[in-house]
Amino acid sequence: MRDTITILGVSIDNVNLVESGLKTKDLIENSNKSCKIIVAPNTEFIMRAQEDREFFDILKQAELATPDSVGVMIGGKLQKKPFKERIPGQAYFREIFRLAEKEGWTIYLLGGKDDVPYKAKNKLQNDFPNAKIVGVHEGFFEKDSEDDVIKEINSLKPNILFVAMGAPRQEKWIFRNRDRLQVDVATGQGGTFDYEAGKIRRAPKWIQKIGMEWLWRLILQPSRIIRMLVLPKYLLKILLKKDITKGNFE
């Protein structure tokens, strides 16, 4: 049985990094190419899901949801159900690559613009030389190219499909095509390819440790200020809501 904590209708698995990797392993081994979906809810995800029924339903149906923000941690503490650990997207991504080397899993990278996914692949192959990256494709292709992209992915039948198109586009793309994708698991990865490609610098370890990576990203990308405004709205919503476990569509 899954150990989850629900915040505004979005259920999130109470796992640490190692456990998230083991649960992913279990999904892969029992999938038989039925495309299990993994999501990483953060504050933006939860708030977007309050207004977007499609996104809300996708998050509820995911086979694994990892806790990916300080706001999520706060939501757990307010219910006196603290999460074991915050799992940043890139930390999960690299944990899966570590396991992929050990288990022999094959990986397909779909996402990013221009040469970003290819630079990311080069960096990852350097850091994880035994990882089997069987395919790469940028993520902002035309709609009429979608069938060809899926055909290529299916011809390679990867165990893991990482999709970096930005939320909620990447989650909606995966969900819409899950019955067509011959992969074991698929997961949205947001800006992870940008980090791996060196396009965005990761925060120093001490900043990551205190949960202030969002501030580091804001300094590097001031345009994110509009997105950051969702945090006080989120905190106000969960503080004023009588039942923090219920979302707008329940």
Image (cartoon, helix red, strand yellow):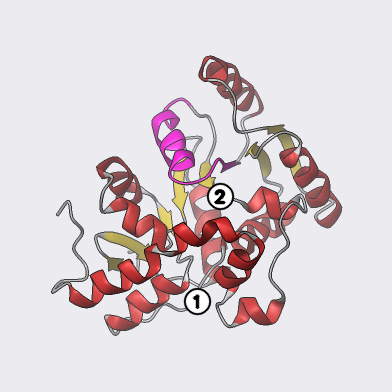
- Asked if one can make out residue 4 in the rendered structure from this viewpoint, the answer is no
- Residue 176: say if magenta: yes
Residue 190: mark in rendering: 2
Look at the image and give the residue range highlighted in magenta.
Answer: 161-180
The answer to whether residue 181 is left or right of residue 105 is: left
x, y percent for residue 242: 13, 74
The answer to whether residue 187 is left or right of residue 229 is: right
Q: Amino acid at mark 1?
A: Glu
x, y percent for residue 219: 63, 67
Q: Residue at x 48, y 50 (%)?
A: 27
x, y percent for residue 111: 62, 38
Label 2 to label 1: alpha-carbon separation: 20 Å
- Residue 148: say if magenta: no
Q: Nearer the viewer, residue 65 or 157?
A: 65
Classify mark 2: residues with Cα within 10 Å, few (<14), some (14-19) or many (20+).
many
Q: Residue at x 68, y 82 (%)?
A: 206
Q: Is 75 situated above or below 146?
A: below
Q: Amino acid at mark 2?
A: Gly
Q: Earlier in the sequence, mark 2 or mark 1?
A: 1
Q: Quadrant of the C terminus?
A: bottom left
Q: Does the residue at mark 2 contact the one at mark 1 (Cβ under 8 Å)?
A: no
The quarter of the picture where residue 132 lies is: top right
Q: Residue at x 51, y 19 (%)?
A: 143
Select label 2 or label 1 by which is in front: 2
Residue 85: mark in rendering: 1
x, y percent for residue 166: 52, 45
Residue 219: mark in rendering: none
- Asked if one can make out residue 70 in the rendered structure from this viewpoint, the answer is yes
Q: Residue at x 41, y 37 (%)?
A: 172
